[in-house]
Amino acid sequence: MFNIILFGPPGSGKGTQSEKLIAQYGFKHISTGDLLRSEIAGKTELGLKAKSYMDQGQLVPDAVVIGMVDNVIANNPDVYGFLFDGFPRTKAQAEALDELLLTHEEKINLMLALDVPEEELIARMMNRAKTSGRTDDADPEIQKKRINVYKNETLAVASYYNQFGKVTTINGQGSIDEIFNALRAEIDGHSG
C-alpha cells in the first residue's frame, strides 16, 4: 500500500484535491470528521464514546479517534492506500498513527503539504462561505484563529514527518489541475 497525508491550512484546497486523488488512484479517504459522523450515526461503541465527549463540549480523545482509524484500515485491506485528510493534527496523533500503521505492517509513505499564503487562504474561505453555508468561513476573525491553530499546533506534524524525509511542499496556488498535477508527480515519483 501507498499511504499519504494531505496537509495544509484551512482553505488550502485539501478537500478538492483529496477527491481528485481518490478518483485517480483509488485511495481510501480517511477524514476524522467523516469518521466521527459515521461512527456516531452508526451508534457504534466508539461513536457513542465520541458523542459523549462532544456532547460535553470536549475534544474526542486521540485513543478513540485512533480506534476509528484502526477499524477503517482493518476493513479495507485491498485498497491502493490510505489518504489521510485533516489527520493527524498533532505530533502525538502522528506518533500514534505511525504505531497503529506498524501493527498493520504499513507506514506513511509521503506527506504532501499544500503551501498557500495567508491572504489567499482568507480570500478562498470568504469565497467558499458564499456557496458552502459554512458560517466559520464568513468570519475573518475565526479564519485567523483557525490559521493560527494550524501554525501553532498542526505544523508540528510536518516537522515530525520531515525528520524522516517524508514531507514534500507543493505550491497550493494556481489552477486546480496545476496543483493536482504537482501532487500526482510527487505520488508517482515516490510510489514507482
Image (spheres, rainbow, N blue to C red):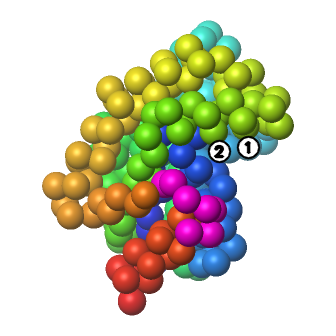
Disc 1: CA contacts within 10 A as few (<14), some (14-19) or many (>=20): some
Q: Residue at x 47, y 71 (%)?
A: 182
Q: Residue at x 41, y 24 (%)?
A: 148
Between marks 1 and 2, how big is the CA–CA gap? Answer: 5 Å
Labels 1 & 2 near each other (Cβ < 8 A): yes
Query: Residue 58, position in %: x, y?
Result: 54, 15
- Residue 35 shows which numbered tag? 2
Q: Residue at x 31, y 43 (%)?
A: 157
- Can residue 66 be seen here? The reply is no
Residues 72 and 83: in front is 83
- Residue 154 shows which numbered tag? none
The residue wearing badge 1 is 38
Please state which amino acid type lies under the numbered disc 2. Answer: Leu
The boundaries of the magenta stretch are: 172-178
Q: Left or right: where does residue 156 sit relative to residue 136?
A: left
- Can residue 156 be seen here? The reply is yes
Q: Left or right: where does residue 158 sit relative to residue 25?
A: left
